[in-house]
Image (tube, rainbow, N blue to C red):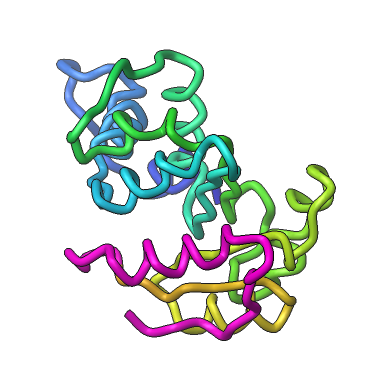
Amino acid sequence: MSSAQVIAGTGIKLDRRFRDDFLQRRLLTDCARMRVNVALFELLREVKAIASIVVATDNMDCFADTFSRIRKARRPSGHRSAATLAQWASVCDDIICSSDVAVLKSEGPDRFFGPWLSRYGMTFQDALLIDDSADNCARFWQQGGTALRWRMGADDITEAATALSRWLDPPARPGLPCAAA
């Protein structure tokens, strides 16, 4: 279901102070205000010149729409320490969202990630997944990719930075199972 269908299904009737699209607009605004882990995005920004940064999310259409709209609308200037999706979407090269590909990461990693990887001439062996789900990491690793389990609430970015550095080192590219952070 789309977010518009979910909103319509709630049957919420707003008074005349609000336009018919108020709840949909509010949902998109709230998506743009979602908090991100600044330390992780700072780390990813450092490798952007040599690696594609792709958000892979099990989320609804409103998240993907917000992400795409923000990326098209503006580019942030300079370094930012802000912690919202709107302020970091331009750091990323693309998004893979379950609502767009009609499968969750854990249900079918080949169907979730495969089309994007193929479109850019890559395989799972060329990719690193940083995810907070052990199941997603294990399934990604089973496809031949490298995965790092890292909880988004973690303050210490050291393990993720070390794993990313190791993965980017071409002779070392380990195909290790996901590590618990």
Q: Is residue 49 left or right of residue 87?
A: right
Q: Is residue 46 left or right of residue 113?
A: left
| Magenta segment main secondary structure | loop
Asked if the magenta segment contains residue 107, the reply would be no
Instruction: Say above or below: 86 vs 164.
Output: above
Q: Nearer the viewer, residue 105 or 177?
A: 177
**Numbered-mark total:** 0
Residue name at image x 28 percent, y 30 percent: 29
Q: Nearer the viewer, residue 113 or 47?
A: 47
Q: Nearer the viewer, residue 74 or 176?
A: 176
Residue name at image x 31 percent, y 43 percent: 42
Residue 11, x across and y down, in percent: 33, 44
**What range of the chain is rendered magenta?**
152-181
Q: Quadrant of the C terminus?
A: bottom left
- In the rendered image, the residue lying farthest to the front is 171
Residue 12, x across and y down, in percent: 27, 41
Residue name at image x 25 percent, y 26 percent: 79
Q: Is residue 150 left or right of residue 139?
A: left
Would you identify the image quadrant in which residue 62 lies? top left
Residue name at image x 45 percent, y 34 percent: 67
Q: Nearer the viewer, residue 112 or 137?
A: 137
Would you identify the image quadrant in which residue 124 lies? bottom right
Q: Is residue 88 left or right of residue 55?
A: left
Residue 73, x across and y down, in percent: 44, 14
Residue 166, x across and y down, in percent: 51, 67
